[in-house]
Image (tube, rainbow, N blue to C red):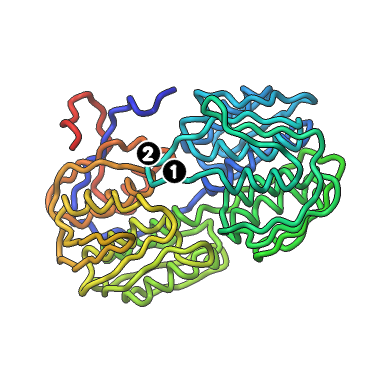
Amino acid sequence: ICWAVVKDRFLVTGGARLEGSVKVSGAKNSVLKLMAAALLAEGTTTLTNCPEILDVPLMAEVLRGLGCEVSVDHETVRITTPATVSSDADFDAVRQFRASVCVLGPLTSRTGRAVVALPGGDAIGSRPLDMHQSGLEKLGATTYIRHGAVVAEATKLVGAEIELDFPSVGATENILTAAVLAEGRTVLENAAREPEIVDLCVMLRQMGAQLTGEGSPTIVIDGVDKLYPTQHEVIGDRIVAGTWAYAAAMTRGDITVSGIAPRHLHLPLEMLKFAGAQISSYENGFRVNMPHRPKAVDYQTLPFPGFPTDLQPMAIGISAIAEGTSVITENIFEARFRFVDEMMRLGADATVDGHHVVLRGVEQLSSTPVWSSDIRAGAGLVLAGLCADGETEVHDVYHIDRGYPNFVENLQQLGAKIERVSGPADPAPR
């Protein structure tokens, strides 16, 4: 399926104050990696609380191409992994989204060989596989790039001491899923600490893996001979929850979000407090109430527990309509500021300087057609449209569908004036 041919667009009418409650489902950045981890054990693994987004059936296609039987039934995904798994990940399915590269570790440890097409996905800058390959090589694999695919081969994986140059989420995941079946102990230093990494480790342990230290910079894995299928509930999506939090603040609204551990959004919620929002935290959610125009706050994206790069478009969105001047610094992806061009079309007063953008807040944005370049940019543009006069057309919304289940329906329930429109009569892109 080529989602790029989909011509749906959103019509967003500004001026509504969002209020009410919304429940988030499982995390996109977790479920796809958990689905890949099911390759490690023969039998049926069941995942619950899965988000109903486009990337889940795409990953299901990747797994079917490797020999698995996969059923997707709303929020439940069942993966039956055979005794013998193919080592070649289907090119057409893999190249459509970045997360598909997470089959590299499981295939290498399970079959001794992995051929995974270099993936596509969001246009937010280069995300090389150097650390993935280096980690697998330290475990005993040989890796190389050939015909647009990364290839890993190993007769036997042996535990090793591995230190990442940067706490890469993807590299951490692939090294983890390779090391759990390696011989001996692996010590992974400067590992990613994201909640989605912890979720993967919890599931691997349920499958019989022996590992400790998830959520810290050092993860220790003692390889085992065999893993077993399991049932696992996916953690709530902190990026979707954060999007609703910033939607409340940008529209001077009042939204209660459930299905998420507030500690997974500690810094983004703190930043909203600095901007003037009233935050209440509960065991399984939080409430954001913004009684007045937000105050300007400076942001910089960093690996967890820092401010997530996936919420950077929301930081830019709130800064565009805040009182005062904000500086946003992007430390993760060099091309993520493509979103700023679209915000400027909406009337944002922004200046980009390298990996910084300076925003001088305006009271109201001005509606115009805009284009999504990635999942989070698309959501950010919709939130900006809610703060504009008139009707904003947001195009290329298939990106948003890849990361946000029932996006339009949830916004409508919160009081937004938004509708999905299909048709071929799109204006020509910029």
Is residue 340 visible in the rendered structure shown here?
yes
Amino acid of disc 1:
Gly
- Tell me which residue sits at (48%, 30%) in the image: 95
- Tell me which residue sits at (75%, 46%) in the image: 139
Where is residue 102 drawn, in percent x and y?
60, 40
**Could you tell whether 47 is left or right of 241 in the image?**
right
**Could you tell whether 190 is left or right of 354 in the image?**
right
Quadrant for the N terminus in the image: top left
Tell me: residue 260, above or below residue 125. below
Where is residue 331 drawn, in percent x and y?
42, 61
The part of the image, by quadrant, that contains residue 190 is: bottom right
Callout 1 crowding tier (Cα within 10 Å): few <14, some 14–19, many ≥20: many
Which residue corresponds to mark 2? 399
Q: Are marks 1 and 2 in contact (CB under 8 Å)?
A: yes
Q: Nearer the viewer, residue 253 or 221?
A: 221
Tell me: residue 71, above or below residue 217. above
Q: Residue 403 shows which numbered tag?
A: 1
Amino acid of disc 2:
His
Is residue 57 visible in the rendered structure shown here?
no
Where is residue 67 drawn, in percent x and y?
68, 22
Q: CA distance from mark 1 to mark 2?
A: 7 Å
**Could you tell whether 160 is left or right of 373 in the image?**
right
